[in-house]
Image: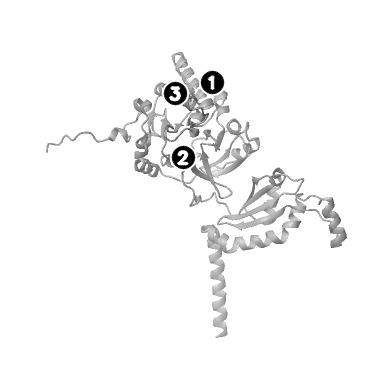
Amino acid sequence: MTELSMWLEATAGLAGAGGIGYAKVRVPRAYWAMVGLPVTLGRFGFSYRSTMDVCGLTVQPSGLRAFMTRSVARREVEPVPPKIRRVRGTSTGLRVTLRLPAGLEPADVTAASERLRHAWGVYSVTVAETKPGFIELRMTGYDVLRRVRMPRKAAPHDMIVPVALREDGTAFVRDYRKVPMALTLGANGSGKSMYQRNLIKGLAQLPIGLVGIDCKRGVEQSAFAPRLSALVTTPDDAASLLEVLVSEMEERFDLLHLYGVSDLWDLPDDVRPVPVVVLVDEIAELFLISKREDEDRRTRLVTALIRLAQMARAVGIHLEVCGQRFGSDLGKGATMLRAQLSGRVVHRVNDKETAEMGLKDIAPTAVPAASLIPMERPGTAVAADTSGGWSKIRTPETSRDEVVAVCRDFAHLVPDLPFLDPFRPQGSSKSSVPGPSLVKP
């Protein structure tokens, strides 16, 4: 009987160890909740002060505190680490709110994030400033970008569209109120099209106008026609469409002047025009020409794009520009246009120069990360903006049929924009409005 009980205990132990190993590989969230989080909490609490001291994240206490320590507590004065204000576990990692002492800044903690990651045995540590004097350490217990699962609360609303997952477990969103113009770069097979699909899927659920410019004969965007207000597939039509958008921009500026405001969202609800997002699939097709006669068309295209990028934010017209490469070699005006696109997302690229084109002018430290994105991880990218901050993201895998189904379900949200009627694609909601019945009663 004793041997049987020992055999059962050994079998149970092996089964438990095997289950934990399986969960670590196949169900990392469950493994983190059962094993990783308690272990990390213990390691963090036990070694916090010594780790901060070794990493150079402590400062000498104030004179009053040093005097009270020597006189009242009768002990040696020790350097002061950031004070822990809150510790919160999540399904992907750990969140720790710290109060920085005088003499430290968030950049100091960011510079030591790699050392903190190894000291506490977590997958990554990122630093986010919540308010002056306070930062949040966002630790992830495992590689959340290996299998992308968007947070449940991530849903499109108020010109905010969740597109991808950050490496700290939070959602990366396109907030058109804060970052009105953006540029997305990536080589073939890097996941750039997947990023655009996720973006269109979210935008289709908002009451806005969507304009597609796909000069590859519409092979990328024509399937989304039920939700598009306009779609052009040749450079000549794109030039005409952009000039119409510039005219609409000027009319909206007249409306702002009439009401004495400087932003579309300051207008009354009953007169506020519908926001419009322009999706450019391949920017190089608008710049490159094959003969001298096309020079005039390119000039019109570039001029209209630059005017929209410079001024259209205030009137609710936004640009989403995609391409494989975007530099001065495209021609006159390319660098000027790129400077107006404040949001940058760079996927895997074929050369370091392309990564520098997208990131070096706003986040130089992100260029090495973008240059090292592996080929076997499509959808991984580096996202940055003009604030200088950047993060690694990855878009969830979304099929083309899924996005098409969403566009059909929300086709009733296509707004009535008469100035775009000449460019309305076949299959849009307005063209399918039922007419008088021809069936004899």
The circle on residue 251 is 3
Which residue does the image show at 41% across and 24% down from the upper left?
241
> Distance between the Cα atoms at labels 1 and 2?
28 Å
Q: Which mark is residue 199?
A: 2
Asked if the residue at tag 2 contacts the one at tag 1, i.e. Cβ–Cβ closer than 8 Å, the answer is: no
- The numbered mark, 3 or 1, whose residue comes first in the sequence reads 3
Q: Bin the neighbour count of mark 1 within 10 Å (Cα to Cα): few under 14, some 14-19, many 20 and up.
A: some
Which one is nearer the viewer's eye here, 374 or 402?
402
Under mark 2, the amino acid is: Leu
Which one is in front, 55 or 257?
Answer: 257
Outermost residue toward the front in this view: 259
Mark 1 or 2, closer to the camera: 2
Residue type indicated by callout 3: Glu
Q: Is residue 393 left or right of residue 132?
A: left
Q: Which mark is residue 384?
A: none
Find the distance from the CA under tag 3 to the CA under tag 1: 30 Å
Q: If you read the primary sequence from the N terminus, does the residue marked by circle 2 or circle 3 appear first?
A: 2
Q: Is residue 308 above or below residue 110?
A: above
| Tag nearer the camera, 2 or 3 | 3
Q: Residue furthest bottom?
A: 1
Quarter of the figure that contains the N terminus: bottom right
User: Residue at position x 88%, y 59% from top?
Assistant: 71
Is residue 372 among the parts visible in the rendering? Answer: yes
Q: Secondary structure at mark 3?
A: helix
Residue appearing at x 34%, y 39% in the figure:
412
In front of the other: 349 or 319? 319
Vertical relation: 132 (above or below) 97 = above
Q: Which residue is mark 1?
A: 331
